[in-house]
């Protein structure tokens, strides 16, 4: 009987269902994807999935459950499997989509996506997913709730402006709009207070956030969002991986002399981090000579201000990671010191 070396369950996660493909590698290094089934994305579906996998796999070899990070829909399954002691890997969507382009897949369906995830897991040595620490899980829930409140408040303000600009404004509508805005302001203030309490209860986290906020333009909220969304950089190994995780990595398409694609950021990553980096980058460009120099150099090169601002966002995000790992504050006079040293 052929000995099995590796077993992978590739899971394509949707809001209501899990599309699962099973694969294995034998002692001759032959890869085979041999079974496929769909389950409900809920606890009863998780239990059924476990029974099915136990039936169709070699119980002498561990099964690596590999899934794509699909918003929040994958989280319940990941927590369930982790609590049961199983090996789980959660892969960034841009990695899977890039990998699928290398395969001979003409039609992308849930089944072919799960097969691609399974094959990816068979071919690669993936990091084990770790459950976020409670402090980071709580911070992420609060920062995302605040983000939704800010979006709701912007919509309410737009509605208020439209109502006030009408020829015959309705006083009661204006009153209710103002009340909604007042409530949302109070809720945002309450969330910020809760965030401050959470941070203060963790002395080590509080210390590191103080170091991170030494970066020009980066405030407590920005630092908390980045740390919450990355679980304190738990699975981040380097700056390049962090930039890819945030979706700030640059992609382009060049082929010969006829195909010249315009470089752009992938946006296939964590949108909360990208959004959090926007205002700090603008603040840093105005108030820090180091970031201003980066911005001016890039604008003079290609003339696109937004592209240069995104480059500053990447630089600030990299510095947050560096300060977290080195525990050394940001040196605002670094550029001036460098110029003096080289003069």
Image: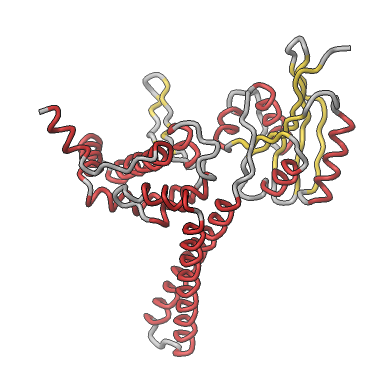
Residue at position x 24%, y 44% in the image: 332
Q: Quadrant of residue 157?
A: bottom left
Nearer to me, 323 or 125 = 323
Query: Which is more toward the observer, 339 or 280?
Result: 339
Residue 17, how many percent across, how many down? Answer: 75, 47
223 or 32, which is in the foreground? 223
Q: Is residue 106 left or right of residue 9?
A: left
- Residue that extends furthest to the bottom in the rendered view of this protein: 171
Q: Quadrant of the N terminus?
A: top right
Residue found at x 55% / y 36%: 235
Residue 78 lies in quadrant: top right
Of the 4 image quadrants, the one containing the C terminus is: top left
Relative to 109, does residue 161 appear above or below in the rendering?
Answer: below
* 243 on left or right of 288: right
Which percent across, then down, holds residue 186? 47, 75
Q: Residue at x 74, y 44 (%)?
A: 83
Q: Position of residue 11 (x, y in %)?
A: 72, 37
With 299 as the anchor, is 87 left or right in this view? Answer: right
Furthest toward the front, the residue is: 203
The mark total stands at 0
Residue ID at (30%, 43%): 330
The scheme the figure's colours follow is secondary structure
Q: Residue furthest left?
A: 343
Taking the image as shown, residue 210 lies to the left or right of residue 151, namely: left
């Amino acid at each position: 009987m052929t000995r099995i070396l590796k077993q992978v369950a590739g899971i394509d996660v949707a809001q209501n269902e899990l599309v699962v493909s099973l694969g294995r590698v034998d002692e001759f290094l032959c890869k085979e994807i041999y079974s496929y089934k769909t389950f409900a994305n809920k606890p009863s579906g998780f239990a059924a999935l476990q029974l099915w996998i136990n039936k169709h796999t070699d119980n002498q070899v561990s099964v690596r459950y590999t899934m794509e990070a699909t918003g929040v829909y994958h989280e319940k399954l990941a927590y369930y499997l982790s609590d049961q002691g199983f090996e789980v890997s959660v892969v960034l969507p841009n990695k899977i989509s890039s990998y699928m382009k290398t395969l001979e897949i003409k039609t992308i369906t849930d089944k072919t996506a799960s097969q691609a995830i399974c094959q990816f897991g068979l071919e690669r040595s993936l990091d084990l997913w770790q459950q976020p620490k409670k402090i980071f899980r709580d911070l992420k829930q609060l920062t995302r709730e605040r983000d939704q409140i800010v979006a709701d408040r912007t919509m309410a303000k737009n509605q208020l402006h439209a109502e006030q600009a009408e020829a015959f404004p309705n006083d009661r509508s204006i009153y209710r709009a103002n009340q909604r805005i007042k409530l949302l302001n109070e809720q945002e203030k309450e969330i910020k207070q809760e965030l401050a309490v959470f941070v203060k209860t963790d002395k080590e986290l509080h210390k590191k956030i103080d170091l991170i906020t030494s970066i020009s333009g980066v405030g407590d909220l920005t630092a908390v969002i980045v740390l919450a969304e990355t679980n304190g950089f738990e699975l981040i190994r380097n700056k390049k991986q962090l930039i890819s995780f945030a979706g700030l990595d640059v992609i382009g398409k060049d082929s010969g002399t006829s195909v010249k694609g315009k470089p752009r950021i992938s946006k296939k990553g964590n949108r909360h981090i990208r959004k959090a980096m926007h205002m700090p980058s603008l603040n840093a460009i105005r108030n820090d000579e180091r970031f201003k120099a980066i911005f001016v150099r890039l604008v003079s090169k290609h003339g696109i201000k937004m592209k240069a601002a995104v480059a500053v966002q990447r630089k600030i995000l990299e510095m947050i990671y560096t300060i977290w790992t080195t525990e050394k504050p940001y040196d605002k006079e670094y550029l001036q010191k460098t110029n003096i040293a080289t003069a």
